[in-house]
Every structure is written in structure tokens, then in C-alpha cells.
Image (tube, rainbow, N blue to C red):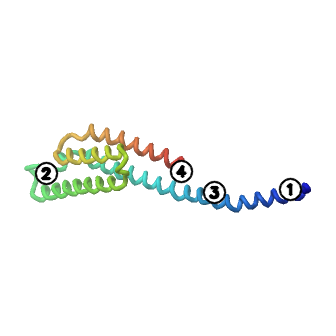
Amino acid sequence: MEVKDLISIGALSIAFLALFIAPLVNARISKRQVIAPMRQAWINALRDKVAEFISIVSISRFHICPSDSYSAERKDKANSEDIQRYERLKLLTASIQLHINSTESEHQQLITLLTSIVSDYHDDKDTHENVDDLILLTQKILSDEWKVTKKT
């Protein structure tokens, strides 16, 4: 065999390999291009839901619930707002619960903490310590998810 023949066989072999390798590489790249934005959207949605949850529980029910000295109309309005805020907390808790992986321990802790905060909020107990824990735990979960997203 001559050098020209070896070069031709080598070039043909490389072209043949490229024919099979290129689709595999392209599939992997396209998977990254689809999954990374979806994960980032999930991270953003979870962050927004937890932030809204915190904003609601940060205002004590004491400031919303009606006083005996209120007029009937003002009492009705305050009661309505209180019910709407509580309903929104329950909805956010359920939505967050559906957004997370229930098999991961930190995610289970998140739901336990949210449920505890809703209960304390309903009973007009101080939620500040639990809210601080919620912020720290959520930051940890979001940070871990961001690291996974960067690797994708």
C-alpha cells in the first residue's frame, strides 16, 4: 500500500466516525440547551413562591384581624383580607410542595417548615425564627440546584 492509499483510508475512517459521533454530540448539546433553561425556570419559580410566602407571613395577623372597635364594614374587609392571605399561604405551600422532589431530605424539611409557619401564622404566633430558617434552607436548596444546572 502506498501513502496515498493510507491517507485515503484514514480520511474515510475519520469521516465514517464523524458520521456516527456528530449526532451523539449534537444530541447531548441540544439536551443541555433544553434542560438548563427548564431548571433555571424551576429555580426562579421556587424562589418567587417562597419570597411571596415570606412576604405574607412577615406581616402578623394582628395587623390585619379586625378590632372590636372597628365598624362592621371595616371588620368584614379585614376578615376578608385575613382569609385571602391564609388561602394564599395554603396555595403557595401546596405549589411549593409540588415543585420539589419529595425524596430529598432538605426538600422534606422545607415542606415541614412551611407547614409549621402556616400553622404558627394561623395561631398568631411569632414566625420570625422559622422564617429565618426558611430563608437559609431555601438558599441552600436553590444553591444546590444552581450548581446542578451549571453542570448540565
Amino acid type, label 3: Val
Most extreme residue toward the top is 129
Residue at left offset 12%, top offset 59%: 73
Q: Spatial distance from mark 1 to mark 4, Cα to Cα?
A: 40 Å
Give how far across and how far down residue 15 sits, in percent: 76, 60
Q: Spatial distance from mark 2 to mark 4, Cα to Cα?
A: 51 Å
Q: Nearer the viewer, mark 1 or mark 3?
A: 1
Please name the residue that numbered disc 3 is placed on: 25
Amino acid type, label 1: Leu
Q: Nearer the viewer, mark 1 or mark 2?
A: 1
Q: Earlier in the sequence, mark 2 or mark 4?
A: 2
**Left or right: 19 with respect to 135?**
right
Task: Verify CB contact (< 8 Å) between mark 1 and mark 3.
Answer: no
Q: Earlier in the sequence, mark 1 or mark 2?
A: 1
Q: Earlier in the sequence, mark 2 or mark 3?
A: 3
Q: Earlier in the sequence, mark 1 or mark 4?
A: 1
Residue at left offset 49%, top offset 47%: 148
Nearer-the-camera pick, 49 or 18: 18
Q: Nearer the viewer, mark 1 or mark 4?
A: 1
Q: Callout 1: 10 Å neighbours few (<14), some, many (20+)? A: few
Q: Identify the image quadrant of the N terminus.
A: bottom right
Q: Which mark, residue 6?
A: 1
Q: Spatial distance from mark 4 to mark 3, Cα to Cα?
A: 14 Å
